[in-house]
Image: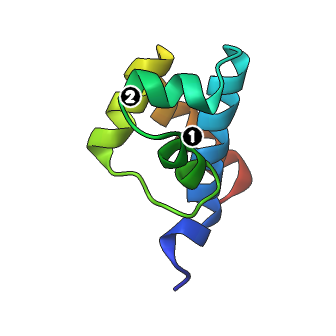
């Protein structure tokens, strides 16, 4: 089994977080400031160098104004469409 950061589903999860951040014209620095974390925290999970746990995901979703349930439903719907 491949490392979970290399799993296509996890890569898509990160990509959706990136797209959500960018759609709000928010930089990594701005998001990191909101999260009270260094910019490298955002960079590392966006680049797949670091996994985020559930609590971190909920914090990121709140900072981006995302409904975590809707976000996960979108991810699951894409998985079904792509047969992942």
10 Å crowding of disc 2: few (<14), some (14-19), many (20+): some
Whether residue 51 is situated above or below residue 20 in the rendered picture = below
Q: Nearer the viewer, mark 2 or mark 1?
A: 2
10 Å crowding of disc 1: few (<14), some (14-19), many (20+): some
Quadrant, the C terminus: bottom right
In the displayed image of the protein, which residue is found farthest to the left?
A: 55
Whether residue 53 is visible: yes
Whether residue 31 is situated above or below residue 17 in the rendered picture = above
35 relative position to 83: left or right: left
Identify the residue under disc 1: 75
The Cα–Cα distance between marks 2 and 1, rounded to whole angstroms, is 23 Å
44 relative position to 22: left or right: left
Q: Depth check: 18 or 12 in front?
A: 18
What kind of colouring is applied to the model shown? rainbow
Q: Depth check: 81 or 55 in front?
A: 55
Q: Secondary structure at mark 2?
A: helix
Whether residue 68 is visible: no
Quarter of the rendering containing residue 21:
top right
Q: Depth check: 40 or 25 in front?
A: 40
Estimate the x, y position of residue 42 in percent, counting from the top left. Answer: 53, 42
Task: Return the mark for residue 35.
Answer: 2
In contact (CB < 8 Å): disc 2 and disc 1: no
Q: Depth check: 59 or 16 in front?
A: 59
Residue sitting at 66 percent across and 25 percent down?
Answer: 27
Residue sitting at 27 percent across and 40 percent down?
Answer: 55
Residue sitting at 56 percent across and 57 percent down?
Answer: 10
Quarter of the rendering containing residue 25:
top right
């Amino acid at each position: 089994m491949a490392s979970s950061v290399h799993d296509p589903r996890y890569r898509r999860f990160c990509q959706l977080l990136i797209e959500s951040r960018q759609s709000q014209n928010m930089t990594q620095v701005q998001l990191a400031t909101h999260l009270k974390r260094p910019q490298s925290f955002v960079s590392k999970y966006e680049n797949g160098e670091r996994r985020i746990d559930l609590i971190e995901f909920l914090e990121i979703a709140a900072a981006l104004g995302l409904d975590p349930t809707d976000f996960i439903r979108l991810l699951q719907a894409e998985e079904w469409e792509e047969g992942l």
